[in-house]
Image (tube, helix red, strand yellow):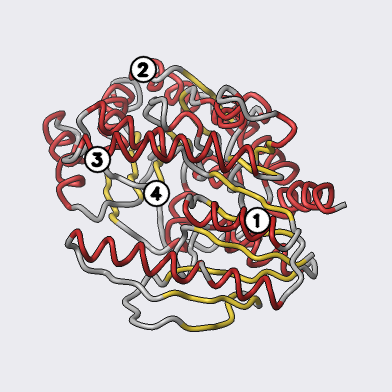
Amino acid sequence: MKFIFLTSDKFPPFRVDLKILFGKEMVQRGHTIHWLLQSEKACSTSFNTIWCGSQAWVGATDLGSSVLNKIRKHVLDILNDLKMFQLVRKNRYDFIQVKDKFISALLGIIISRLYKCEFVYWLSYPFAEASIYKANTGKTRYPFYYKIRGYILKHLLYRVIMPLADKIFVQSNQMKKDVMAMGIPEQKLTPVPMGVSLNMVPYNSKATSFEKRKDEKVVLYLGTMIRLRRIDFLIRVFDYVLKYESKARLYMIGGSHDQADLAFLKKEVEKLGIERSVVFTDFVPMDKAWEYVKKADVCVSPFYPTPILNSTSPTKLGEYMAMGKPVVANDHPEQKLVISESGGGICVPYQEKEFANAIIYLLQNPTLAKTMGEKGRTYVEKKREYSKICDLVENQYDKLIG
């Protein structure tokens, strides 16, 4: 197959679904991808390059912080996407695929009709609903702007883009249900969850520079510490765990670009008087993060429940399971599905005491925890490894283009 791919991700893309699913798996299977992306770093002129064996047309950008700079950045992005016309005239594509863009999706639909190829839309996050949610909950300085933008994007997405798309990929089963509730036919929709590249996971590696203290039981969180994630929930959970497992230690692997977020979490630790039992590493390279995960007795995935985040597909859950670790997660739709299908951990409501009791139970039952970790690893190998996910996506492309 040969297709052109426009995405809101910047160049070079860092998300594993783009790097592995498309940059590696699709290319290794002989498919040709032409990318249109905007530069992440300061760039005053567009350029053509090779990324993961595929041609990429990278657009200029404006990294200024003023309103005019931001408008210029969007205009430059659209101008780069307009290269679609030239590329489609020169190349015979099987389809045009647009991910998480709106204006460019409209352009893609027009071009696909003019040049008689299919149009595929990929939605990874409910951007329209998130904009409205921020306006309604006061989580933005410009609520009126966010509300207007949200309703405009919502109308474009569900009344124009998706009805005219030939195929639609969404992030999860929950997102599929949400999109269907907006009147989009089920047969157009295929959920593609986040996966794991097992080649990048040091599952069998023994080498590590991280040593546990004697009799220490490690509870581990790997991920962002931004305040919007409400990770202070986990600090209070762990305070309860310590009442029953005094030698437990919580490792918080990750950080936030806003140091105030980390300061807030550390203050919560100090308030509870558990400084000796909680370790903050801040950002660490992924190979170092894996070393911590290897030593974990239990990994945790608290996911603050909101209508916006319910349709997402968490990455860390699959990473924990790929390392053979038992997981305690709350009943976010995707997490609940994975835990129930795999048997790789315990899923509980988003309540501090219930979350803590699940951690305590696994710490006190290491044989059961080990069995759960093995089940999780097997599940990832069968269903969430990117070669398996690529099979799913490739099959849908085959059906689309016949």
Q: Secondary structure at mark 4?
A: loop
Q: Secondary structure at mark 1?
A: helix
Mark with earlier residue (2, 4): 4
Residue identifier under label 2: 351
Q: Amino acid at mark 4?
A: Lys
Quarter of image, res 89: bottom right
Q: CA distance from mark 1 to mark 2?
A: 32 Å
Residue identifier under label 3: 145
Q: CA distance from mark 1 to mark 3?
A: 43 Å
Q: Amino acid at mark 3?
A: Tyr
Q: CA distance from mark 3 to mark 2?
A: 34 Å
Mark with earlier residue (1, 2): 1
> Badge 1, how many Cα within 10 Å: few under 14, some, many 20+?
some
Mark with earlier residue (1, 4): 1
Q: Secondary structure at mark 2?
A: loop
- Give the total number of marks visible in the rendering: 4
Instruction: Tell me residue 237's x, y (percent).
Output: 31, 25
Q: Amino acid at mark 2?
A: Gln
